[in-house]
Image (cartoon, rainbow, N blue to C red):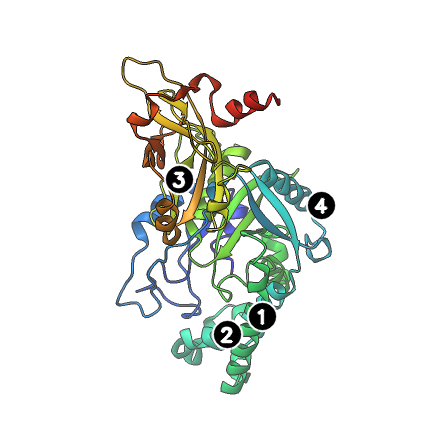
Amino acid sequence: AGSGRVPAAFNNLVGYKPTKGWFSAHGVVPACRSLDTLSVFTYTAADAAHILAIAAAYDAENSYSREREAVGFNFGAASHFRFGIPRQQQLKFFDNHDSERLFNESIAQMQAVGGEAVEIDFTPFIETARLLYEGPWIAERYAAIRSFYDLHSDQIIAPVREIIATAKQRSAADAFEGIYQLRQLKQQADRIWANIDCLLTPTAGTIYTIQAIQQDPIRLNTNLGYYTNFMNLLDYAAVAVPAGFQQDGLPFGITLAAPAHQDESLLHLAHRLQQAYSLPLGAAGIAFPHNIHFPAASHSSQARIAVCGAHLSGLPLNEQLTSRQGRLIAGTTTSSDYRLYALPGESPQKPGLIRANPNEVGFAIEVEVWELPEREFGSFTAKIPAPLGIGTITLANGETVKGFLCEHYAILHAEDISHFGGWRNYLRQLTGSN
């Protein structure tokens, strides 16, 4: 439990645990076949995202393989998102004050990249974590090695042998009771996700010496799994991210988690955090490479649209976006080769954006980039009256998105307001406000 994240945290690496079934486990010796997930260790979240794009595929020979599902809001790329953190009394650092300090610093880093912290009740996650080794899933671990265990249990190291031995005390009725309990806990946890986009925890509350683990392996291993043992049972994806160093030089890591199929959002957010931390990579001491780019999302059910006029936040037509579950992703500008015009006779007032001719001076025009569910895109564009329409706009960073453009005939008698740099600035001068 946590095998794809705890070692990553202890080695200043990214540890990516994908959604169950995204990576085929065909040919892998199982631990808990119904829960097993192959994990990836990388220097950077961008590397993990590239591996995801290559390795994630449905495998008809693996009975637990899953198709990837398109998801909605990409919180990892958003200028504002909400992240859950356990209540203060539910956080455990096992007397490691460095870990506590570094976790508090990670909250500040999340806020610096646009996150809003939301305190949550961690109880359903704690109770679910206990099920992994105290519930009937221990019998599945026995099932995985049954033929070997029954003949060669003396060859298994003592802590593992002791844990698996308890499986023989479990009944089929216990298994169903565990399934019922997990279902109830997941329902409780699901309610929490209505208010947050992702979960932030330490990857592990502390780090132990090998000697300490050897002296008390089961209890200390349970401590190390406090923030990880619930992940697969609740069907979450997770990414461990390096988050600084203790005073003794040992690494500390945080984990970002979200429900299944949110992997790309988690990795994108992890990438932004790595850029903010700028820590050296792994144990190699290599400087963090700021020139690496996060790969474009391959699965999304969202359409991005750039707006430049009455659909901007707080203006009369913005409701057409928000009523369709639109979410503001970023405020930015176009590339510096556009012109903006105030269209006459429009109610409410609207501008027209066009691309400047090669022999014209262009301007960077203020826009907002919104994300809209694809199912809402058609009804949104159906409300756009001539001379406006949807075309392709180039943003300041070179990215292209769909956005509002204007037909050229409409600007013949329109006021050129390009020098204002945007519709808001133009409206301010009309009203005389700052």
Q: Which amino acid type is shown beneath numbered disc 3?
A: Ile
Q: Which residue is mark 2?
A: 137
Viewer can see residue 306: yes
Q: Which residue is mark 4?
A: 97
Which tag is nearer the camera, tag 2 or tag 3? 3
* Residue 82 rendering spot, x and y as whole percentages: 58, 48
Q: Residues within 10 Å of mark 4 (few under 14, many from 20)?
A: few
Q: Which residue is mark 1?
A: 185
Element under disc 2: helix
- Residue drawn at (56%, 69%) of the image: 187
Element under disc 3: strand
Mark with earlier residue (1, 2): 2
| Relative to 360, residue 229 above or below | below
Q: Residues within 10 Å of mark 1 (few under 14, many from 20)?
A: some
Mark with earlier residue (1, 4): 4
Q: Quadrant of residue 148?
A: bottom left
Mark with earlier residue (3, 4): 4
Q: CA distance from mark 3 to mark 1?
A: 38 Å
Mark with earlier residue (4, 2): 4
Of residues 68 and 52, which is closer to you in this image? Answer: 68
- Residue drawn at (72%, 53%) of the image: 88
| Relative to 252, residue 1 above or below | below
Q: Which amino acid type is shown beneath numbered disc 2?
A: Trp
Mark with earlier residue (3, 1): 1
